[in-house]
Amino acid sequence: MRVLKSETMKIRSSEDIVLVRQWVRKAAVSIGFGIVDQTKVVTASSELARNTLDYGGGGLVEGAIVENDRRSGIKLTFTDEGPGIPDINLALTDGYTSGSGMGLGLSGAKRLSHEFEISSKVGEGTSVTILRWK
Amino acid sequence: MDRIPILKMGRFLLVTIQVDMHDRLALTLQDDLTSQIIKHKARGVMIDISTLDMVDSFIGRMLGSIAGMARLLDASTVVVGMQPSVAITLVELGLSMKGIRTALDVEKGMAALQASVLEQDQGQDESTEI
């Protein structure tokens, strides 16, 4: 997998979530995503950016336009140095929330993506990567 | 501070969400709408989301709370103009938007609000007769 273009953005406020959404929308348009695929990857990015802010205490997202021999896609990696997730399977359950949300962020973002990876260490932080191919 | 304008049309309030809302703006709208419902004794709220190219769980939850608060203040809510790509994404996200009435466009939304006010008024007349 080759990286054609990448950018790292800070997630420190709810305005930053909007900026992340806008970057993802632009990137998706630039590689010819249709409107439904654009909306799916933008929505997934919004859910994960909000998790990074609300549960991770803020962090970073690395957005990248990638390609392999057959197709191109958008890859997003969200990292924070927050409290971490003690039970990832529980966190991925629809409707489970440790905060005030609806508990759809992680599970929803996973459903909206083609590839999904999460790693977390209690006390050290969380990293979530999603990829949506064109 | 940024604010989303709320228009009064007779007994109804009309909100058109035209910006990519950040979270605080969404919460301000919730507060503004509830106070405007009281101030104007509004019976219905129409929220036009036709220019929103994304609805995530936060905005979905906000729409649900507005509908719930409005109901407690004796006003009906209808959300109009959802884009097809937004509807497809919401279902895959897992957000069912239960309890939120929707209509395809402003005209149909207005008809739905008028019908629900009429229904409620008739219901109240009947109960006072008994």
Image (spheres, rainbow, N blue to C red):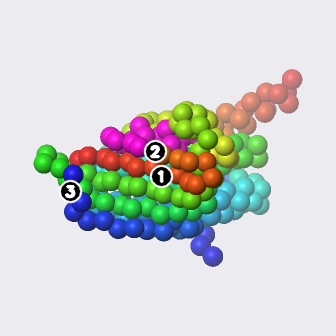
Could you classify mark 1 by the number of other residues whose Cα lies within 10 Å: few (under 14), some (14-19), or many (20 or more)? many
| Quarter where residue B89 is shown | top left
Mark 2–mark 3 contact, CB under 8 Å? no
Taking the image as drawn, is residue A130 in sight? yes
Q: Farthest residue toward the bottom?
A: B1
Residue found at x 71% / y 35%:
B120
Q: Decide which of tag 1 and tag 2 comes sooner along the chain.
A: 2
**Residue B57 lies in the magenta-colored region:** no
Mark 3 residue type: Arg
Q: Are marks 3 and 1 on the same chain?
A: yes
Q: Is residue B24 above or below residue A92?
A: below
Label 2, label 3: how far apart the Cα atoms are: 21 Å
Return the residue nearer the eye: A44 or B95.
A44
- Which structural element holds mark 2? strand
Can you give x and y, in whole percent of width and height, for residue A38 in the image? Answer: 32, 51
Residue position for label 1: A127
Label 1, label 2: how far apart the Cα atoms are: 6 Å
- Which structural element holds mark 1? strand
Image mark 2: chain: A
Residue found at x 39% / y 67%:
A8
Mark 1 residue type: Ser
Could you classify mark 3 by the number of other residues whose Cα lies within 10 Å: few (under 14), some (14-19), or many (20 or more)? few
Mark 2 residue type: Ile
- The answer to whether B56 appears left or right of B3 in the picture is left
Q: Decide which of tag 3 and tag 1 comes sooner along the chain.
A: 3
Mark 1–mark 2 contact, CB under 8 Å? yes
* Magenta residues, start to end: A103-117
